[in-house]
Amino acid sequence: MNFPIINISELKSRALNSRLINDSFWALFGNIIAKGLALVAGIIVARFLGKDTFGEYGIIRNTLMSIAVFSTFGLGYTATKYVAEYKNSNPAFLRVILKYSRNITLFVSGTMAAALLISANYFSEIVLESSHLANPLRLVALWIVFNAVTTTQIGVLAGFGDFKGMSRINTIVGIITFIFSLSLTYYFGLNGALVALLISQIVNCWLNYRLVKSNLPQRSDSVEIDKPLLKDILKFSLPVALQEALYSLTSWLISLILIKLASFGELGLYAAAMQWNTIILFVPGILRNVILSHLSEVTNIPKRHDRVLKLTLIINFLMTFIPFLIVYFLSDFIANFYGDSFVGLADIISIAVFTAIFSSMSNVYAQAFMSKGKNWLMFIIILFRNISIILLFYLLFLEFQDLKTGSYILVISNLIITAFFFFILSLIYKLKVH
């Protein structure tokens, strides 16, 4: 039997000349450093603060994320799609796309930040039942605006394909976040950790602004206003914004329910485990804009679209499965770094990182849905998924609270629903979208 001869040099040449692989490399390069430093900083911050205060830090971050995600109005992905489509076919539209994206982002995020400032007392006393968290919430309200602008800027840069420039910025911001998180948390506790978040976000926003400006074409023949384009942007962004808001709202509600049913300490355990889930997912997370950019460019070329989709599914699986194995076998070792108060963390980490595999694969299909303009269908799927997670967690907690901790039950619920909906998502894509 004759077997085909694999030409290693040819494969290497094709890989080096593949724009998708090159863009993926640069998207990952800076984030490996940034996420690695963030992980180490997160462990040290948790150790400095202790389980209960780290739980308070977790609920404040979840609150900010819930508000911040909707404050972008989905314009991160929208900007990627429209810039990728127009940068070659009609570059005159680029400036008006950026103008609309910036103005919408500032208006929505500014409104959200003002609302948090005004309602901080009510929110901390009535919702969180911890009145001492009012000032920390006010302290980082401005973070919402800078985070929203940064998200839109990243979307624009992904549309331009400047992943190398973003890699440099991520490296710088990662170092700054590490230094300020450790030093400010050590001296000022919870407030110091929150100020570090704000400082790093401001620096990120400023560096992204400079990079976006350098990518814009120097030609002056731009469109000043285009109402149909604005309508298309809003129409595309609304379901994306609702998807992101739904995800963050679910995360926040789950955190709140965990506090109400259990304690801040259980939320601290869950937040610590989800740090590792986030680390495992950093490759799929960073590649989301890369995937959307490339899928959007070939939306009307089915064979190339399918090829990109299959390749990214393989990449996402490998880039989550391998880190999962490493973290799983080192979970006991990792848990020891958090301190004596984080009892039972190893098992929770193991489940949380296994869930990341199904989440990463689902992210690929989510970008494929978006590239095809099926944003409302994706929103409906996510809505049912998130409701299912909350319901299953509540039911399992009532049934097994005497046998397992609240944080353990929560990660089990998340795993079951995430795995089930990955298969549902892939099936719907093949039957309805493909």
Image (spheres, rainbow, N blue to C red):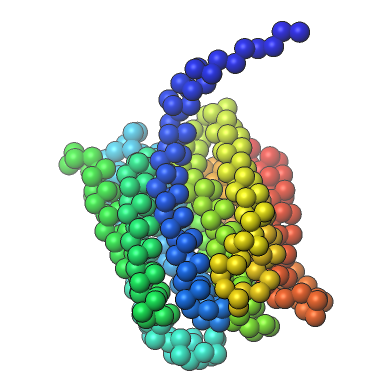
- Taking the spot 67% from the left edge, 54% from the top edge, the residue there is 329
Using residue 67 as the reference point, say whether residue 209 is left or right of it. Answer: left
Q: Nearer the viewer, residue 342 or 309?
A: 342
* Observer able to see residue 234: no
Question: Residue 432 lies in what quarter of the image?
Answer: top right
- Determine whether 255 is above or below 283 in the image: below
Image x and y of residue 132, in percent: 46, 90
- Taking the spot 74% from the left edge, 59% from the top edge, the residue there is 416
- Taking the spot 60% from the left edge, 16% from the top edge, the residue there is 6
Question: Residue 177 lies in what quarter of the image?
Answer: bottom left
- Taking the spot 57% from the left edge, 60% from the top edge, the residue there is 276
Question: Residue 101 lies in what quarter of the image?
Answer: bottom left
Quadrant containing the N terminus is top right
Image x and y of residue 176, in percent: 33, 61
Using residue 334 as the reference point, say whether residue 416 is left or right of it. Answer: right
- Determine whether 130 is above or below 168 in the image: below
* Observer able to see residue 339: yes
Using residue 26 as the reference point, say whether residue 371 is left or right of it. Answer: right
Quadrant containing the C terminus is top right
Q: Nearer the viewer, residue 291 or 228?
A: 291
- Determine whether 253 is above or below 298 in the image: below
- Determine whether 381 is above or below 59 in the image: above
Using residue 276 as the reference point, say whether residue 405 is left or right of it. Answer: right
Q: Nearer the viewer, residue 372 or 284?
A: 284
Count of numbered circles on the image: 0
In the orientation shown, which residue stands out farthest toward the top? 2
Image x and y of residue 41, in percent: 44, 65
Image x and y of residue 50, in percent: 53, 79
